[in-house]
Image (cartoon, rainbow, N blue to C red):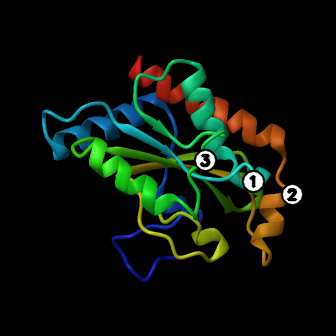
């Protein structure tokens, strides 16, 4: 299912537009972001989107908390204690632009997808539209992104997010954290 706007992607799974997450691919995309921003740009900013109120949407905040716990050298926005979600995304995006104007933003968010792909992590050479899987209209976020399929697509996406397995989400967050830290440390 293609987006009507070809230059903006969503957080609903698109197999032909994703790269399996691995340190080499992430390093390559981070390198291309640094070049396109400026040679003086610092480390990337990591924006972990989601809420701890829905297990299937907690991939971002859990990842953010793990990154801080394990000493991520980059600024991290969005943790279990201070989540970045639909109600504060605009404010947090403004803060990031103000404090890190030349840094690329790596956005991390949960998504819904085919049942056979639950637990899959994908890297994208573009940002994302958070909340599009639950029909919210939020601003385009990030320069590159990592999405993880936490449960299957459904006619009732909030129910799908409520019934995701916590063990799956935690395993995915650990994998994202490990990949990011192996690139940055």
Q: Which residue is mark 2?
A: 163
Report crowding for label 2: few under 14, some 14 to 19, many 20 or more residues within 10 A (C-alpha). some
Q: Residue at x 32, y 37 (%)?
A: 30
Viewer-nearest residue: 162 or 165: 162
**Residue 32, visible in the rendered structure:** yes
Distance of label 2 from label 3 (alpha carbons): 20 Å
Mark positioned earlier in the residue sequence (2 or 3): 3
At mark 3, the secondary structure is loop
Q: Which mark is residue 14?
A: none
> In the rendered image, which residue does mark 1 sit on?
56
- Sequence-wise, which precedes: disc 2 or disc 1? 1
Among all residues in the image, which is located at the extreme bottom? 4
Q: Residue at x 50, y 67 (%)?
A: 10
The picture places residue 37, in percent across and down from the top left corner, at 18, 45
Location of residue 161 by image quarter: bottom right
Using the numbered discs, state the Cα–Cα distance from disc 2 to disc 1 in whole angstroms.
7 Å
| Label 2–label 3 contact, CB within 8 A | no
| Residue linked to disc 3 | 83
Callouts 2 and 1 close, C-beta under 8 Å: yes
């Amino acid at each position: 299912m293609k987006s009507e706007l070809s230059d903006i992607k969503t957080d609903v799974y698109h197999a032909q537009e994703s790269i399996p997450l691995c340190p080499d691919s992430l390093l390559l995309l981070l390198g291309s972001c640094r070049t396109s921003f400026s040679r003086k740009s610092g480390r990337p900013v990591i924006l972990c989107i989601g809420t701890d109120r829905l297990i299937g949407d907690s991939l971002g905040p859990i990842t953010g908390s793990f990154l801080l716990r394990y000493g991520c050298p980059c600024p991290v926005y969005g943790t279990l204690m201070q989540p970045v979600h639909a109600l504060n995304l605009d404010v947090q995006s403004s803060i990031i632009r103000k404090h890190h104007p030349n840094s690329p933003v790596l956005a991390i968010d949960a998504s819904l997808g085919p049942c056979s792909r639950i637990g899959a992590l994908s890297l994208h050479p573009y940002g994302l539209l958070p909340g599009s899987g639950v029909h919210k209209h939020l601003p385009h976020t990030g320069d590159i992104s990592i999405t993880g399929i936490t449960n299957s697509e459904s006619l009732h996406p909030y129910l799908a997010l409520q019934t995701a397995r916590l063990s799956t989400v935690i395993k995915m967050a650990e994998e994202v954290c490990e990949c990011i830290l192996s690139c940055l440390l």
